[in-house]
Amino acid sequence: MTARGVFSLVVAGSVAALTAVGACGGGSSKNPAAPGDASATSTDGGSTAQDGALSIPGPGMATLNGPQAFPVGSAQLGPSLTGGCGGSIVPDSGVIPTVSILLTSEGLPPLLCSDGTIPDGGTGYWLDLEIATIQAAMGDEVLTQSIMPGTYVIGDEAEDDPDLCMLAPGSNAFLQIATPTSGDALYTAIQGSVTIDSVSEHAITGTFTVLLGGPYGTSDASPPPTLSGAFNATSCH
């Protein structure tokens, strides 16, 4: 996914749709995020991606740990940047089937809360973490489930422009890192999980741990590098 392609769908005010997420706060047995627990184990004898005990930062912030970590300047909550999957019937008010958690490094504009254009140059990174309900990930026609606290499994489509409804069965999230000047995403998560701790009217908190591959989700590293993070992403309001 190119840096400009990833964020070409960002428009001013698009995050307003997330203000209804407050109606979805708390747990729900109607939306099991994904089978399994909060870890994902490598099938090739390599390393294991596992959520660690990370502290949730203050509103609009995130922390990252790992070789590919960068200083985060903002953490924003918005609709999926890559478009929706399924649900040709508009969901009822208050139903939020997909979200994007965008971490922006210091020195780059916070795209989800900015009227400015995407820069063609400069240094820094964007981390795009996208999550879907099981219904949305399966491309269901009618979407009635909302993002809730729980565990979401990272999937690898083996493309640099993944879609939430084209991930491997049993997964419903993806993570990529891009820069203003990269033709492709620098890194795509090949394995891992996201744990959502809380969902409120204007914020979502949680942690993630992933194994990173290259732009297309491949990795020559043995074991692949691990990236973990804690976020308190807020919408523009």
Image: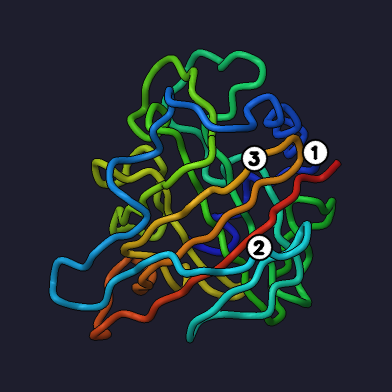
Disc 3 crowd rating (10 Å Cα; few below 14, some 14-19, many 20+) is many
Asked if marks 2 and 1 touch (Cβ < 8 Å), the reply is no
Residue drawn 39% across the image and 60% down it: 160
Q: How far apart in space, not on screen, are marks 1 and 3 (Cα)?
A: 20 Å
Residue drawn 64% across the image and 32% down it: 25
Disc 2 crowd rating (10 Å Cα; few below 14, some 14-19, many 20+) is some
Q: Where is residue 28 in the image (x, y as percent from the top left)?
A: 49, 27
Ranked by sequence position, the earlier of labels 2 and 1 is 1
Q: Which mark is residue 13?
A: 1
Residue drawn 36% across the image and 27% down it: 139
Residue drawn 72% across the image and 27% down it: 20
Ranked by sequence position, the earlier of labels 1 and 3 is 1
Is residue 171 found left or right of 45 in the rendered image? Answer: right
Looking at the rendering, in which quadrant would you find the C terminus? top right
Q: What's under tag 2, amino acid-wise? A: Ile
Of all residues, the one furthest to the front in this rendering is: 53
Q: Residue 201 carries which label?
A: none
Label 2, on which residue? 56
Q: Where is residue 105 in the image (x, y as percent from the top left)?
A: 69, 73
Label 3, on which residue? 199
